Amino acid sequence: MKIVDLSRQASALNHFLSQLRDVNMQNDRLRFRQNLKRIGRVMAYELSKTLSYQEQAITTPLGVKQAALSGDRIVVGTVLRAGLSLHEGFLSVFDDADSAFVAAYREEGEGDSLKVRLEYRAAPCLDGSTFIMVDPMLATGGSLVAAHRAFLEAGTPKHLHICVVIAAPEGIAALQKAFPSDDVTLWTAAIDERLNEKAYIVPGLGDAGDLCFGEKI
């Protein structure tokens, strides 16, 4: 698995991420969701540089102009519910992409005993697609691996991109084990220190789903 850490180069991405982390700003759900969308747009733009392109003729009112356009069939897949705002950011760049969704959540246990439950999946055919899985937090990696397994029931993509906002080293190690081939790329805006005893990322930012949409019952 290839890893692209966008925090290695200073950019506006750092500003968006700092606001996501700031406890003094986290009560503003609109700002939190907007920053996830903005990070999604930045990531999508950076990812777009890796797609395949072909010259095509574009007719303007005054003539014809050659332009390099991607012919990749893109599907953006999201783990509900925390990934929804990030998903919207990707769709604002890949506006003709299809969408896929899976509901996955922590059911019980901590650390290595943590169990992930899947309850819902909706996806188009993924055969031959460029599949982009987005989820704000990569903690243990269990949810993303389980979601990918569920998505594969809809077909096999030609390339898999996993896009997260914050990753823990433990989650990265889990994905490297699950996806050893070079046709998988992990994109992240930050790599944090570690997981705590409850498998939450430190320093992280808290529960992205709750900060976007309110606490779960």
Image: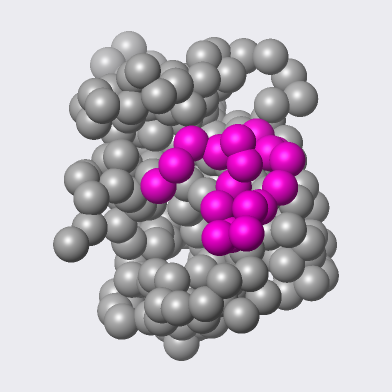
Magenta residue span: 190-207
Instruction: Say which quadrant the N terminus sits in.
Output: bottom right
Which quadrant, please, contains the C terminus? Answer: bottom left
Specify the principal SS of the magenta part.
Answer: loop
Q: Nearer the viewer, residue 174 or 10?
A: 174
Q: Position of residue 53 (x, y in %)?
A: 61, 42
Residue drawn at point x = 30 percent, y = 40 percent: 211
Q: Is residue 116 magenta?
A: no
Residue 143 is situated, as x and y percent measured from the top left of the image, at 51, 69
* Camera-nearest residue between 156 and 203: 203
**Residue depicted at x 79% and y 72%:** 177
Q: Can residue 53 be seen at all in this image of the molecule?
A: no
Residue 102 falls left or right of residue 70: left
Residue 90 falls in image quadrant: top left
Q: Could you say which quadrant of the image residue 188 lies in?
A: top right
State the residue at coordinates (45%, 42%). 206
* Between 141 and 93, the one nearer to me in the picture: 141
Residue farthest toward the bottom in the current orientation of the protein: 153
Looking at the image, is 199 positioned above or below residue 39? below
Pick the residue in front: 146 or 4.
146
67 on left or right of 19: right
Residue ID at (37%, 51%) = 83
133 left or right of 100 in image: right
The answer to whether residue 12 shows anywhere in this view is yes
* Residue 27: image location, x then y, percent: 26, 26
How is the protein colored in the picture? one colour
213 relative to 180, above or below: above
In the picture provided, is 3 more to the left or to the right than 166? right
User: Is residue 200 on the magenta stretch?
Assistant: yes
